[in-house]
Amino acid sequence: YIETQPNIFVVADPNTSADNTAGSFALYCQSKSYNNTMVTAYTLATHIDAAVASVNLTYPPGSKNWAYTQVASVPADNYTDTEIANLNAVNCNYYVALGNGTGGNVPNVFFKGIVGSGQYIDTILGRDWIKFNLQQNLLNLFLTTPIVNYDDHGLSMIGNVVSNTLAQAVAMGILAPSTAMPLGFVVNIPPASTISADQKRTRVFTACSWSGNLAGAIDGLVPVTGTLGFF
């Protein structure tokens, strides 16, 4: 049900064992390529799902990477490298002490912030923000404009709403400029003259499309190289 709704399901599953992920809920979500469901395995880290969600969902979309989340009063699990590899293989999250607690006082952190499909949940939240705000802003155009004509001027009004919404997504950190997309996005609105008369009679515009460059996030550095010497 969740996968058909604009919602996310964050769940901790004690039955997703790090040494045997076969038949686990995480594997099931991976097999279904679920985009709205995030599974976290735990042995000791009870309620890690609620704790991680309560921290990260206070941030606007685009401003928080769920990886490296630290929460209070939740004990970390201690997984071997092999067990973590098993969890990664089924797109399952976990809450551990960095370095498995070796090397002194180390923080407990949440990894990786991924959903069943393997996509990052911050990307999913950004996607949902764009979709919701495009719908709201386009609806507002029709509510506040006496008529949106089926001509170049009317189509440009639609294009401006889409562009302004995507520009806000850039400002929020959901999208980012790139060499291929200097604005961080491209909006495609064809000339009214290219749209058939039959299509115009329906009063439905179907030729608006856009592309956006994801800002993404960095979760690690491999490797960090350096040189010592007298220069």
Image (cartoon, rainbow, N blue to C red):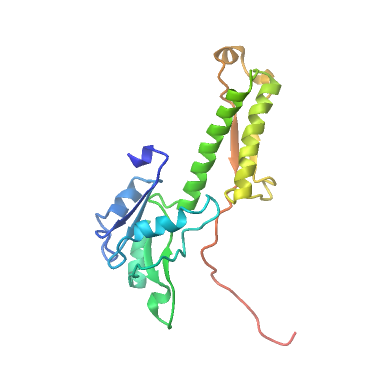
Q: Position of residue 109 (x, y in %)?
A: 42, 68
Q: Is 225 in front, or is 1?
A: 1
Identify the residue at horizontal 61%, vertical 39% (top origin): 165
Q: Is 104 in front, or is 28?
A: 104
Q: Position of residue 158 (x, y in %)?
A: 63, 28
* Residue 90 visible in the current orientation: no
Quadrant (top left/top right/bottom left/bottom right) for the C terminus: bottom right
Q: Is residue 49 left or right of residue 59?
A: left
Q: Is residue 134 left or right of residue 182?
A: left
Q: Classify 69 as above or below 150.
A: below
Q: Position of residue 44 (x, y in %)?
A: 29, 68
Q: Classify 160 as above or below 51.
A: above
Q: Classify 195 as above or below 176.
A: above
Q: Position of residue 72 (x, y in %)?
A: 39, 67
* Residue 208 visible in the current orientation: yes
Q: Is 72 in front, or is 81?
A: 72
Identify the residue at horizontal 54%, vertical 37% (top origin): 133
Identify the residue at horizontal 40%, vertical 81% (top origin): 102
Count of numbered marks: 0
Q: Is residue 153 left or right of residue 141?
A: right
**Residue lying farthest to the bottom in this orientation:** 230
Q: Classify 105 as above or below 18.
A: below
Quadrant (top left/top right/bottom left/bottom right) for the N terminus: top left
Quarter holding residue 108: bottom left
